[in-house]
Image (cartoon, grey):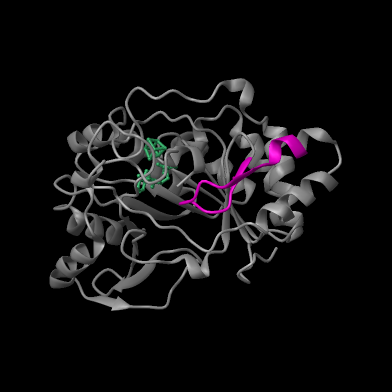
Amino acid sequence: MIDPFGRSVTYLRVSVTDRCDFRCVYCMAEDMSFLPKAEILSLEELDRLCSAFVAKGVRKLRLTGGEPLVRRNVMWLIERLGRHLQTGALDELTLTTNGSQLARHAEGLVKAGVRRLNVSVDTLDPARFRKLTRWGRLEQVMEGLAAAKAAGLRIKINAVALKDENEEEFDDLIAWCGREGFDLCLIETMPMGDIDGDRTAQYLPLSLVRARLARRWTLEDTDYSTGGPARYARVAETGRMLGFITPMTHNFCESCNRVRLTCTGTLYMCLGQEDAADLRASLRASPDDTLLAAAIDEAIGRKPKGHDFIIDRRNNRPAVPRHMSVTGG
Ligand code: SAM
Ligand code: SF4
C-alpha cells in the first residue's frame, strides 16, 4: 500500500477496545462513556480485518486500546494473529499495555509469538501512580512487568511527561530502566479528547527535559529507529535507549508508515486528523474480502500529509475531539 505522498503503509495499530481499567488523567475523564457493545467488532471480525491488512502488505501489527488485555478473550485474537508470524507474512505482533493484566497473560503472549511489549509507567511512586491513573495500582503493574521479563519479553516503558507531576522523576525512571534492562520512551502530551483537567498546565516540552537530563546522563545521539516517531539517544551510563516522542515540537509526519483502526472498524489515516473510513460496512457487506480490500485501497489513497496539533491556549479545547483510547496511542 503506497499513499499519495509515496509513503509505504506497513504498520497497523488496532484499538481492540476503548475500555480501560485505569483512568489516566491525560487520557480520559473519570466519568467516561464508552461505546455500546453492539457497535464493537467481534474478535472474529477483528481477525478478518487485520488479516486483510496483512494480505495487503502490513508487516507489523500493534494491539492497543483502551487497555487491550481487558477485552474478554483477547488472547484468542492474539493467538489467531500469531499464524501470520508463522507464515512469515508478518514481522511483528506486539501490544501497548498498562501492564495491569500482564501477570496472567505474559506466557500466553510469548506462546502466540509476541516478543516485545510497550508498557506505560509514568511514575515509580505508588501514591503518584494512583493519582495519575486514578484507578491503578503500581504494585500490580510491577508484578506484571516481572512476569513479562521472566517470560522473556523485551520491554519498552512509555512515560508521558507531565509538568509538576513526574518531571522530577525522569532520572529515577532512567536508572530503574537501566537496572531492569528496559528501554524508555518519554512522550509529550497530545491534545486529544476532553479530559477533566487543563492540558496547557500538563504540557512539558521534551526539548527542556532533554536539556536537563543531559546534565546528569551522557546522551549519545543514534539513528536507532523502531520505524516510529521517537528519536532515540543511548544512555551511556546504562547502555539502554531513551526515546523522545515530540508531536508538539517536531514534525515526524514525512516518514509516517502507519494507519490506525478502532474497535468499531473505523480506519484513521492520521492520528491528528478527523478524516476516517468506515471499514465495518464493507466487512459486513460480504463474506469475501473483495469489497473490504477496495475500501482499504480507497482509504490509503486519502492518507493526509500530516497533522497540526496545537494546544489551544485560549479555548483550552483539544485539537482532536476523540480520545487517545479510541484511536489507540
Ligand atoms: N492502555 C494502554 C497503555 O496505557 O499503554 C494502551 C493505550 S494508551 C492510549 C497508549 C499510550 O498513549 C500510553 O502510553 C499513554 O500514556 C499514551 N497517551 C494517552 N493519552 C495521551 C495524550 N493525551 N498524550 C500523549 N500520550 C497519551
Ligand atoms: Fe487506560 Fe492507557 Fe488511557 Fe491510561 S493511557 S486510561 S491505561 S488507555
Q: Is residue 269 shown above or below 256?
A: above
Q: Position of residue 78 (x, y in %)?
A: 63, 42
Q: Residue at x 52, y 54 (%)?
A: 270
Q: In this view, does 33 lie to the left or right of 15?
A: left
**Given the current orientation, which residue lies at the most extreme front position?**
314
| Quadrant in the picture for residue 146 | top left
Q: Where is residue 302 in the image (x, y as percent from the top left)?
A: 63, 56
Q: Nearer the viewer, residue 322 or 209?
A: 322
Q: Residue at x 78, y 33 (%)?
A: 284
| Quadrant in the picture for residue 265 | top right
Q: Which residues are the magenta region?
A: 266-282
Q: Which quadrant, please, contains the N terminus?
A: bottom right
Q: Residue at x 40, y 47 (%)?
A: 119
Q: Nearer the viewer, residue 145 or 8?
A: 8
Q: Position of residue 178 (x, y in %)?
A: 29, 62
Q: Residue at x 40, y 40 (%)?
A: 98
Q: Position of residue 113 (x, y in %)?
A: 62, 51
Q: Which of 18 and 116 is in front in this view?
A: 18
Q: How many marks?
A: 0
Q: Which of 108 and 157 is in front in this view?
A: 157
Q: In this view, does 45 lie to the left or right of 266?
A: right
Q: In this view, does 324 lie to the left or right of 235?
A: right
Q: Magenta segment: does it hold 280?
A: yes
Query: In which of the image's four quarters is ligand 2 placed?
Result: top left
Q: Magenta segment: does it hold 75?
A: no
